[in-house]
Image (cartoon, grey):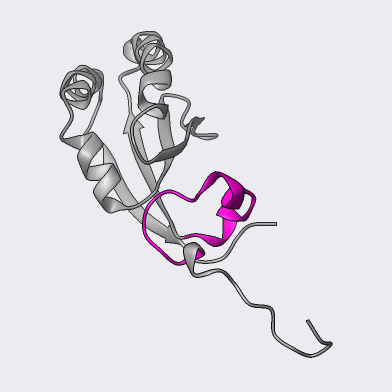
Amino acid sequence: MYVGQPARLSLSLLLPGPAPLALRPFSHLLPVLIRIVRLPLRPEAVADFLTLFHQSAAQIRQQPGCQHLELWQDADQPHTYCTHSHWHDAAALNAYRRSTFFGEVWPATKRLLASPAQAFSVLRVAPGA
């Protein structure tokens, strides 16, 4: 490549589907669907929720298209938690939401809520620092 000549990206970076193993260091360049679910729990249900989350987390992370999962606790409302997950695309998230596993975990979670959960999805458009 000559000075001033633009770098060329492989078209495989732009194709749908999981990135080939050799390209995974560049995964921060690929679109990611980020899902955040805010869960206002009943105070007496927090311990049960944490148990349920820790029992389910590994299986959620193994779902096709799941790239990341973590649990956050609200700094001002200690009985409110948020799940933060990254998915390859909306189809992967929706496939998980239609799964038998989700059909077991979500009703169990809903029983622990003080009020309805709030969920939203966003797309990462620029990599973080």
Residue 43 is a magenta residue: no
Q: Classify residue 95 as left or right of residue 42.
A: left
Query: Front-most of 85 and 15?
Result: 15
x 39%, y 27%: residue: 62
Q: Residue at x 50, y 32 (%)?
A: 72
In the rendered view, would you say 43 is above or below 114? above
Question: Along the horizontal axis of the image, is 35 left or right of 14?
Answer: left
Could you tell me residue 106's position as x and y percent?
21, 25
Kindly identify the residue that appears in the image at 79 percent across and 90 percent down. Answer: 4
Q: Residue furthest bottom?
A: 4
User: In the rendered view, does 31 fall on the left or right side of 4?
Assistant: left
**What is the quadrant of residue 127 in the picture?**
bottom right
In this view, the residue in front, 115 or 81, is 81
Q: Residue 24: x, y in percent?
A: 58, 48
Q: Quadrant location of the C terminus?
A: bottom right
Q: Residue furthest right?
A: 3
| First to last magenta residue range | 13-30
Residue 26, magenta (yes or no): yes
Residue at x-position 25% and y-position 24%: 113
Q: What x and y, as percent, mark residue 85?
A: 42, 39
Q: Residue furthest front?
A: 1
Quarter occupied by the N terminus: bottom right
The x, y position of residue 97, in whole percent, is 21, 36
Q: Is residue 88 above or below residue 14?
A: above
Count of all numbered marks drawn on residues in the image = 0
Position of 126 with respect to 108 (left or right) is right
Quadrant location of residue 29?
bottom right
Above/below status of 41 relative to 27: above
